[in-house]
Amino acid sequence: MMKRLKLCMLAMAAMYSACSQSSTTGGAQQAADGQPAAASSVYIHFFSVAWGCVEVDKAKLDAAAYTIQSFETKAGPCPATLPVLDATSKPLLKCPVAIGPQSIPATYILFDKRTLDGKTVRDMRAEGFTSENFCPAVAERTFN
């Protein structure tokens, strides 16, 4: 029984490793001729507050003929890290949100550190922010 459990755990670890390696390559795929395939999604992002980034598939905005109005957008997905004074902030959680009156689906990424006064680094994880208590509130908001 213990050998089976150990084998199952090793198999799960191998699968996790293979998945995490493929996801760190940015989802790049090889076409049949060995050339990288075109990316399936092109993202833009904007910051709604100093510690939150909204990421949306540009094709979905284009399909709805909608332009972000209230925020300055930048090309690409939300950054992997943000500098917060002398600390590095990383994504803490992701929440589904809507953009514009067409309710275009997007993702709100809450980063784990922030500063409100420019002097103190606050830790969102330590303050108890979770998907369960944060996402419902941010999902009520429509970003324009």
Image (cartoon, rainbow, N blue to C red):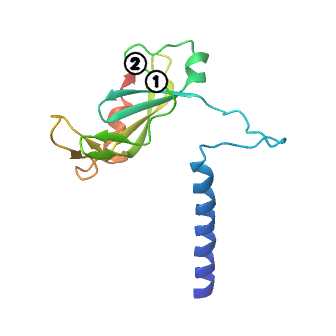
Give the residue number, with chain letter if any, for mark 2.
72
Q: Please say if the residues under marks 2 and 1 sit with CB atoms less than 8 Å apart.
A: yes
At 36% across and 29% down in the image, what residue appears? 140
Q: Is label 2 in a helix, a strand or a loop?
A: loop
Q: Which residue is mark 1?
A: 74
Three-letter amino acid code at the position of disc 1: Lys
Location of residue 115 in the rendering, given as x and y in whole percent from the top left corner: 21, 38
x, y (%) of residue 100? 45, 17
**What residue is at 37 percent from the left and 46 percent from the top?**
90
State which quarter of the image contains the C terminus: top left
Most distant residue in the front direction: 86
Q: Is residue 49 above or below residue 94?
A: above
Amino acid carrying mark 2 in the image: Glu
Determine the residue positioned at 63% across, 52% down: 22
Q: Nearer the viewer, residue 134 or 30?
A: 30
Whole-angstrom CA distance, mark 2 to mark 1, is: 7 Å
Q: Is residue 45 above or below residue 95?
A: above
